[in-house]
Image: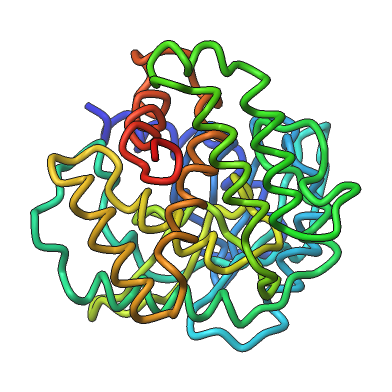
Amino acid sequence: MEKILDVEASLSDPWLAYFADRGHTGVRRIGAGVEGVVYALGQGRAAKVWSGRPTVDLDLTRQVYADIARHSLPFATPEIFDVEDPEGVLVTYERELPGGPMRVDSARAAYERDLPTPHKDALLAVLRGLASVPGTDAMRALTVQGDDRPLWQDRDSFRDALAALVARAAARNGAALAAHVPDFDTGVERTLEALLALPDAPVTVIHGDLVPPNIHVDATGRTVALLDFGFCTTAGDPAFEAGVTAAVHDMYGPYAAEHTAELTALFAHELGYPSATLTTYQAAYALVTYDLFGLDDRDGHFRWCAQQLRRNSVFSA
């Protein structure tokens, strides 16, 4: 039934004619989500027709993409080439990203106990690549989802900026999380102390949401593209990216805790980040994202954040 509906939608889709009239041949609809519908235009370009106005500053996002694209990376990243506003509908023209998702989200399919070596190698390649891109003013000016100000506003270091965000997020709806996490207030204080005690670190681009569907690979398993920057994108310590990636790779599968521990140890060994730093950042991530989709354990992400904090050795020391 879904395929029939997709065909009918394509046949009645006025945007196919809109893009064809502008000289694009072989236009096809390739995806749809909450934000809008994406069309392949050929010659490495795609268009996104937004269903509403973006919640991010599109000019700022465009600059961040350009800042990243200036660096030679072994995988493609998004670029916005042009923006149109026909009859009040926002259309962005972007780079079409190659490959397909590394794998589906762990909420949809349980991962096996032994993580495939090609997947671990791909994660290391992505983390090394992003860590080579210096942070920029545009990245510092981004606001992470759920907050009301740029992460770096009035702050001179990532650790201070992140600690301030943790404090704001814990105060926002912390009572809801405290109902599921013992000694919540003490754990928040431990996390803040650990963050503020971190040494100075390089400031590089942070994707912030390197779940497997956002990492595209080719038929050989080689990483060829990253997508969906914006959820927690900023400039910061590359160890934050590594710690978060280890935690979110498998969020809901039967071996989620084991996979987080395995990837945390792998990234510490291969990338030289102290394990305690990665664990501190994992606690911070849970504290700044717990209330983005729901405020009790009926919501999967809220439930995951509570589980993360209960077993985190920094938060629950």
Q: Which of the 4 image quadrants contains residue 170?
A: top right
Residue 315 spot, x, y in % from top left: 45, 38
**Of the pair 213 and 127, the residue shown nearer to us:** 127
Q: Which of the 4 image quadrants contains residue 205?
A: bottom right
Residue ID at (68%, 42%): 144
Residue ID at (75%, 66%): 81
Residue 31 spot, x, y in % from top left: 45, 46
Could you tell me which quadrant the C terminus lies in?
top left
Residue 30 spot, x, y in % from top left: 44, 51
**Of the pair 193 and 218, the residue shown nearer to us:** 193
Horizontally, residue 308 falls left or right of residue 113, namely right
Residue ID at (28%, 53%): 260
Above or below — where is 203 with respect to 241? below
Q: Residue furthest right?
A: 154
Could you tell me which quadrant the N terminus lies in?
top left
Q: How many marks?
A: 0
**Of the pair 135 and 193, the residue shown nearer to us:** 193
Residue 146 spot, x, y in % from top left: 66, 30
Horizontally, residue 139 falls left or right of residue 269, namely right
Residue ID at (65%, 62%): 94
Horizontally, residue 30 falls left or right of residue 265, namely right
Above or below — where is 71 with respect to 95? below
**Of the pair 95 and 77, the residue shown nearer to us:** 77
